[in-house]
Image (tube, rainbow, N blue to C red):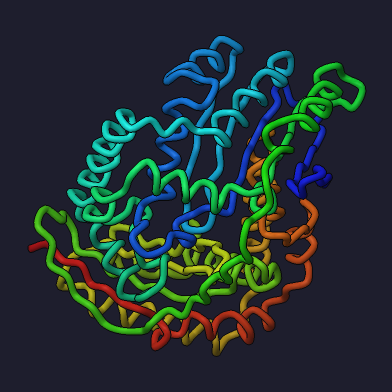
């Protein structure tokens, strides 16, 4: 990793077999950093970035990137936002200038702002029209009250309607600062190649290098504490009932805890041979499907279980889930099952590193927050886990009494 003179960070990884270059710009500017009245601002700004910059007309970025043979995308999460661009090596230098200009000097034109707000409001309406999304948001709100993780990333309608270009510009100035930004370069970046040398030269004089540091001290990330509880929701147009359970798991900075949580959720619900899937779907046929996903986040990760079934089977499903957890605590995990879980976690991580974009995404999530681990650190940490330690240290985190539970049923 290198630091530019203003403190902005750049990470470059050469992947000799990659045919493309990935430019991935990350910023600590997700919805968790929205202040009062700014609900949805992080996501709305991501939309507005593509409406032109100080030097780019609306639509010009996409036209020029596509003319270079590239493609772009962006995503806003709870913790961060990132802008992703894949480009042939001979177009990488021009693409870098386009990307940094677009992200760091957005135009925020009033007419485009009003039009794009309608797009964001329509996106919000579509989300609110999907009963599955409504159920998930209800669960997050109940389990994470007074925390940004319990609020919709798309925002609240009343606050979106009140936002202005001036307020968005202030949001951008506050969060898109040198110390909060990270640029990942991965792919075909042989140190002696002309485009690699040119990329390094351009970076030194780029808009990223001209960014100012934060004007004030950072606001500490609010710690997460999932509130246990029981909730029930009747939803029109929901086709099947859902049992949803939410747990707090180790935060992203705790690599060892995250790898343990990944192992446990895999053992319980990854594939037909996993314990919950085998018992509830394959043998008892109580559920149409059951998933247990790990969402790694900075304030505290979330474990989310979702079982789709008939409403009358929900009580039995809950009993069986608790029975599976009790059995796991009481019995030794067979070596074959333990080995299967470790292989699935390790291979899932390795598969994510097969492309330049996958490498950039992994490095971005690691380095943006100063975790600074190497690409192979998760695999090395995985070797430090054994079955007794998993049962002793991680299984208690999934205790039923620690969960926020929502039963969503058709109205």
Give the residue at the far right of this rendering. 192
Position of residue 318 measured from the top left corner of the image (x, y, whole percent): 31, 79
Task: Give left or right: position of 296 versus 256.
Answer: left
Q: Which residue occupies the foreground of this view, 198 or 247?
A: 198
Give the residue at the far top of this rendering. 67
Task: Give left or right: position of 61 versus 47.
Answer: right
Position of residue 114 measured from the top left corner of the image (x, y, whole percent): 27, 35
Q: Quadrant of residue 317?
A: bottom left
Position of residue 395 measured from the top left corner of the image (x, y, whole percent): 55, 81
Residue at position x 54%, y 63% in the image: 297
Give the position of the C terminus as an image quadrant.
bottom left
Q: Which residue occupies the foreground of this view, 210 or 254?
A: 210
Position of residue 329 measured from the top left corner of the image (x, y, whole percent): 54, 87
Residue 47, relative to residue 333: is it above or below? above
Q: Is residue 17 visible?
A: no
Residue at position x 44%, y 64% in the image: 292
């Amino acid at each position: 990793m290198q630091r530019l003179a203003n403190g902005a960070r750049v990470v470059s990884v050469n992947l000799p077999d990659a045919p493309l270059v990935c430019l991935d710009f990350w910023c600590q500017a997700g919805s968790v950093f929205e202040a009062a009245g700014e609900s949805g601002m992080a996501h709305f700004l991501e939309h507005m970035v593509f409406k032109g910059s100080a030097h780019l007309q609306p639509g010009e970025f996409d036209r020029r990137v596509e003319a270079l043979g590239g493609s772009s995308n962006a995503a806003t999460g709870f913790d961060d936002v990132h802008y992703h661009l894949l480009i042939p090596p001979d177009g990488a230098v021009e693409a870098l200038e386009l990307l940094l200009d677009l992200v760091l000097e957005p135009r925020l034109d009033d007419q485009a702002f009003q039009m794009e707000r309608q797009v964001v409001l329509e996106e919000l309406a579509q989300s609110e029209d999907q009963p599955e999304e409504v159920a998930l948001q209800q669960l997050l709100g109940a389990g994470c009250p007074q925390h940004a993780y319990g609020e919709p990333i798309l925002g609240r309608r009343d606050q979106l309607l009140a936002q202005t270009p001036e307020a968005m510009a202030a949001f951008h100035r506050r969060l898109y600062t040198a110390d909060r930004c990270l640029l990942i370069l991965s792919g075909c970046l042989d140190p002696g190649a002309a485009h690699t040398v040119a990329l390094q030269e351009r970076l030194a004089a780029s808009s990223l290098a001209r960014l100012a540091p934060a004007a004030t001290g950072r606001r500490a990330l609010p710690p997460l504490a999932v509130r246990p509880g029981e909730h029930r929701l009747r939803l029109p147009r929901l086709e099947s009932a859902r049992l949803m359970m939410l747990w707090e798991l180790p935060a992203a900075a705790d690599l060892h805890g995250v790898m343990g949580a990944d192992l446990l959720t895999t053992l319980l619900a990854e594939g037909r041979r996993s314990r919950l899937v085998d018992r509830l779907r394959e043998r008892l046929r109580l559920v149409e499907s059951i998933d247990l996903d790990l969402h790694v986040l900075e304030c505290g990760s979330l474990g989310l279980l979702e079982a789709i079934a008939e409403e009358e089977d929900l009580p039995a499903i809950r009993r069986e889930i608790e029975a599976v957890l009790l059995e796991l605590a009481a019995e030794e995990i067979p070596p074959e099952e333990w080995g299967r879980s470790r292989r699935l976690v390790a291979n899932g991580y390795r598969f994510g590193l097969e492309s330049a974009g996958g490498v950039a995404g992994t490095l971005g999530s690691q380095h943006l927050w100063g975790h600074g681990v190497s690409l192979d650190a998760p695999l090395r940490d995985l070797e430090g886990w054994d079955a007794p330690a998993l049962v002793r240290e991680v299984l208690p985190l999934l205790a039923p009494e620690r969960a926020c539970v929502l039963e969503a049923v058709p109205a």
